[in-house]
Image (spheres, rainbow, N blue to C red):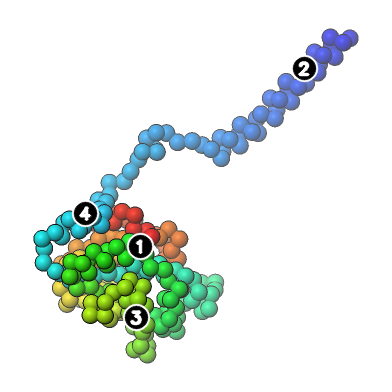
Amino acid sequence: MTKTKLLLSTLALAIAGSTLALPAQATTETLNPGVTINQLSERQPIHWVSIEQIAASLKGKPPMSVGFDVDDTVLFSSPAFFHGKQVFSPNSNDYLKNHKFWDEVSNGWDKFSIPKESGRELIELHLKRGDHIYFITGRPKPTSGHEELTEIIQKDFNIPSKDMNPVIFSGPSHGAKTSYIKDHKIKLYYGDSDGDILDARAAGAEGIRVLRPSNSTNRPMPHNGSLGEKVLVNSQY
């Protein structure tokens, strides 16, 4: 009798153990599918460049005009944009069509925007070279004609007054930056969007991609390098 009970107990435990193991195994396969070494090492064929490489490519060349986009290129301005959405259209992106928002964001709300370190290093590089720097944003012009963005950028990046040109507000239309890039004889233009790269090329300049921060409110995210342009490494912050 004792042997029979022991056998039955052992069998019950074995059945229970196998039953309990099934959900755990299924959960592990679902949550941790694993990756192959090929998946881990896969990289896209992007033309990555560093600030040091850009500097080396410009060595020996005379001072030139260079341009920068503003939002997500030199400023992480999502905090200002997020606030604007809460004020003007919490449940939609209609705030982007509201001139009151654009007036506010370019007249003080950028004090909450965060200067990007990659932008700081690029600006320092070009200031040391004696290049002429222009900031061209796709934002519409403030209706009052007054803006504080120029002052904020100058302060954030410690740009000497003599080297600071007023920010150019091109507006968001397709190709809107091209004429400004051409008029100012800009040779290099840095931006995070496809439009920045295409507008630069249309003006005869080289467009270099700066990575948009992953937590930017500007969606969808661009496909960096998809236009065959140079992409600045580690420029998301």
Residue 168 in sight from this viewpoint: no
Residue at x-position 53% and y-position 38%: 32
Q: Residues within 10 Å of mark 1 (few under 14, many from 20)?
A: some
- Mark 4 → mark 3, Cα distance in angstroms: 30 Å
Q: Are marks 4 and 1 in contact (CB under 8 Å)?
A: no
- Residue kind at label 4, given as amino acid type: Gln
Residue annotated with mark 3: 151
* Residue 106 figure quarter: bottom left
The image shows residue 167 at horizontal and vertical percentages of 29, 79
Q: Quadrant of the C terminus?
A: bottom left
- Residue kind at label 2, given as amino acid type: Thr
Residue annotated with mark 4: 53
Q: Are marks 4 and 3 in contact (CB under 8 Å)?
A: no
Looking at the image, is 7 positioned above or below residue 91?
above
- Mark 4 → mark 1, Cα distance in angstroms: 17 Å
Looking at marks 2 and 3 on the same chain, the residue that comes earlier in the sequence is marked by 2
- Mark 1 → mark 2, Cα distance in angstroms: 65 Å
User: Most extreme residue toward the right, as rendered?
Assistant: 1
- Mark 2 → mark 4, Cα distance in angstroms: 70 Å
Looking at marks 3 and 1 on the same chain, the residue that comes earlier in the sequence is marked by 1
| Residue 10's disc number | 2
Looking at marks 1 and 2 on the same chain, the residue that comes earlier in the sequence is marked by 2
The image shows residue 100 at horizontal and vertical percentages of 45, 84
Q: Residues within 10 Å of mark 3 (few under 14, many from 20)?
A: some
- Residue kind at label 3, given as amino acid type: Glu
Looking at marks 4 and 1 on the same chain, the residue that comes earlier in the sequence is marked by 4
Residue annotated with mark 1: 117
Looking at the image, is 51 positioned above or below residue 166?
above
Front position among marks 1 and 2? 1
